[in-house]
Image (cartoon, rainbow, N blue to C red):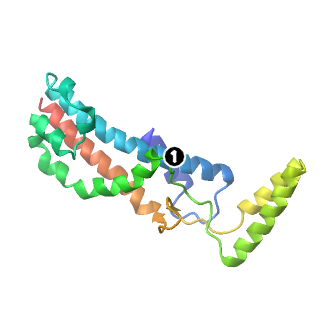
Amino acid sequence: MTFHAYQHISVVADPTRTQPLTHDEQKDLSRDLNVLYMHTRGVLDNFAWSLLYERHPHIAPRVNPYDVGLFSQKYRAQCPCFVEIEKDIDVHRDWDKDLKERRDPVAHRIPLYIPPSFLSEQEGSAYHRLWDRYSKEIAELKVTEAGATLEEMERIGRFIPHFLHDPFEPPIALYPTVPEDMANLIEIGDIVERALVRA
């Protein structure tokens, strides 16, 4: 799911795209962004569990699940083989802290989202006028007219590949943030895989 979400983001929210996202594209991309960050943390936890169960099956059942994590000192103390990869994993420590800033809002019911477009002041005024018209058409059950108005709204502004969480925080660039996060995940996976092969 993580890599499917990443591929979809890369294709639809191409770094060269300037055309605003449609309503459906915006919903799908925001969903994919949240899937990606939720599951990236899960994959890291699964890497930690795999080391325990593959290298130390007699210890694994006794480890507190809340202690499990490649960057957890309690986990490291209970996973004897971790010393073999500690230095390589620690290269990613700052990234792990940064990743939590993107993942934790997802887990705590405050989703990340990709805006469909960024608007100038003039475009914002035009958008609000169309929104008022759209709302009136929906209230009057003028479905065809409302659909046409929505399409007109979707053409306003310029897409800039960024995502947001807190409205009081600056936008985060999709590129290079998301590709770098995936690269770190793959590198950590390779480190853990080598430790498992040595078992």
In the image, taking residue 13 as reference, residue 97 lies left or right, namely left
Instruction: Name the one closer to the observer, 100 or 172.
Output: 100
Q: Is residue 161 above or below residue 100?
A: below
- Kind of residue at disc 1: Asp
Residue, disc 1: 32
In the image, taking residue 43 as reference, residue 94 lies left or right, namely left
- Image quarter for residue 114? bottom right
- Residue 195 spot, x, y in % from top left: 15, 36
- Residue 16 spot, x, y in % from top left: 53, 65
Q: Residue furthest top?
A: 58
- Residue 199 spot, x, y in % from top left: 12, 29
- What residue is drawn where x is 64% and y is 62%? 20
- What residue is drawn where x is 63% and y is 68%? 158
Look at the numbered disc 1 and give the secondary structure of its residue.
helix
- What residue is drawn where x is 50% and y is 68%? 168
Q: Quick check: can you spot residue 41?
A: yes
Count of marks placed on residues: 1
Quadrant showing the N terminus: top left
